[in-house]
Amino acid sequence: MRPWTWVWAPAGGLAALTYLLIHFGVDRWLPGELSTYIVQPLLWSYVALMAALFYRYGLWPRPRFGFSIGLTAAVLGVFQVALFTLAGLFSGFGESPYAHHPLALLGNAGFAATQLAAMEAARGCVTLPLARHRPTLTLLLAALFLAALRIPPAQLAGVIDFPTLARFLGERLLPTFASSILSCLLVVRGGPFASLLYQGSLQAYEWFSPVLPRLDWLVTAFLGTMAPALGLMVLSRDPVEITREKGQVANQRSWMSVAALAVSLYFFNSGLLGVRPTLVVGASMEPTLHIGDVVVTSDVPPEEVQVGDIVRFRTGQAFVLHRVIEIEQRQGEVFFLTRGDSNNVSDPLLPAERVEGRLVFVVPKVGWLSIMVHRALTWFR
């Protein structure tokens, strides 16, 4: 087995160790400015240097960086920034959360640049050996691993139930994962410098723009997955050889499939296609619906809802799936009386405009994974 086959292990391990040291050590032991502007840049600089050495002397052959792939990477990054800016013209802008006086800009530049260099150098070491000798699934796991290193653990603190978990996945994890997939493909095409140009555009916009778009999280999820998906389509037009052994060629269509699946899942989950999935987390509808089932509902006009239908509506921050047992009209307005099949008491009268959908079909038990993830997050928190 050739030495460069295992280059991914020390590079990825060093990046992960630095991530853990920063978020579970340095941030807690040192004052904020000392940690952010001095210690963390030093740690990320060390990772960048070591990963660059692993890449330079441990990987062969390496993809050749050229003007064409560099320009493509930069354009893809600017295009994604332009999409968010255009969305901000419709939804409005808010002040950046980062300070913009000269010293703060200098400190932010050092922090962002060292982290960016470290992550993209590590991406080259992790992605290329797997791209040569592992299936697409392993490459996707590498992209997910590198995306996770972009997300501070503190952002999980707000995950308190399934809706907030879904929001975290859609607003933060899925867009970061999508851009990580595109960055991995850029590494395959032109090495770490290509992915650095793409990610650098995004990081520069986030850290140095005085105003940022104030977007609904669904819009953020959509743009954050759609833009990398379009980038994957651009890169997929010209297959590129990534190893000379046995004529192996990167199967870039598989990357496109993953991107298309991610965007489709976003549309499905957000309700933009007229259907929504809902996880059953209670026993009020047993034996019809069980905990862990996923119910798919579709939009329906109130006049089409009939007695016996199972409808979805919101109570506070929770979604409820109960059966309509009676329909009433009061002063020209329609109200539904609902009740869980295993409940003895009916719900308060439900105005027709609060009905968000009617049951179409049920997928049994597939939601248990989400329930276990939620319980694990609650336990760790």
Image (tube, helix red, strand yellow):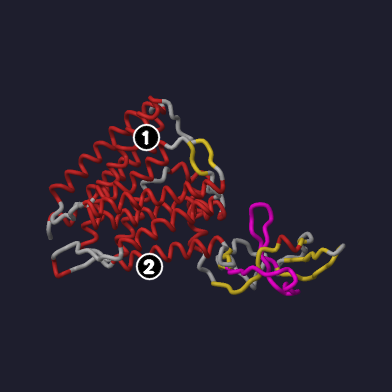
Residue 175 versus residue 65: which sits nearer the camera? Answer: 65
- The secondary element bearing badge 2 is classed as helix
Mark 2 Cα shell of 10 Å, populated few (<14), some (14-19), many (≥20): some
Q: Which residue is mark 1?
A: 25
Amino acid type of the residue tagged 2 in the rendering: Ser
Q: In x, y percent, where is residue 128?
A: 22, 56
The vertical placement of 98 against 271, above or below, is above
Mark 1 nearby-residue class (10 Å; few <14, some 14–19, many ≥20): few
Residue 78, x across and y down, in percent: 37, 48
Q: Residue at x 34, y 57 (%)?
A: 181
Give the mark toward the camera: 2 or 1: 2
Q: Which residue is mark 2?
A: 257
Q: Which mark is residue 151?
A: none
Q: Is residue 249 above or below residue 175?
A: below
> Looking at this view, is 160 or 166 the one in front?
166
- Give percent across and percent down for residue 127: 26, 55
Residue at horizontal 39%, vertical 60%?
A: 230
- Asked whether, in this view, residue 245 is left or right of residue 25, the answer is left
Q: Which residues are magenta?
A: 295-322
Where residue 358 sits, quadrant-wise, is bottom right
Q: From the top left corner, tell me how far across and down residue 139 is, in percent.
A: 30, 60
Farthest residue to the right: give it.
Answer: 331
The image quadrant of residue 98 is: top left
The three-letter code of the residue at mark 1 reads: Gly
In this rendering, is residue 24 above or below 326? above
193 falls in the magenta region: no
Query: Rounded to the nearest whole Å, what is the CA distance between mark 2 and mark 1?
Result: 39 Å
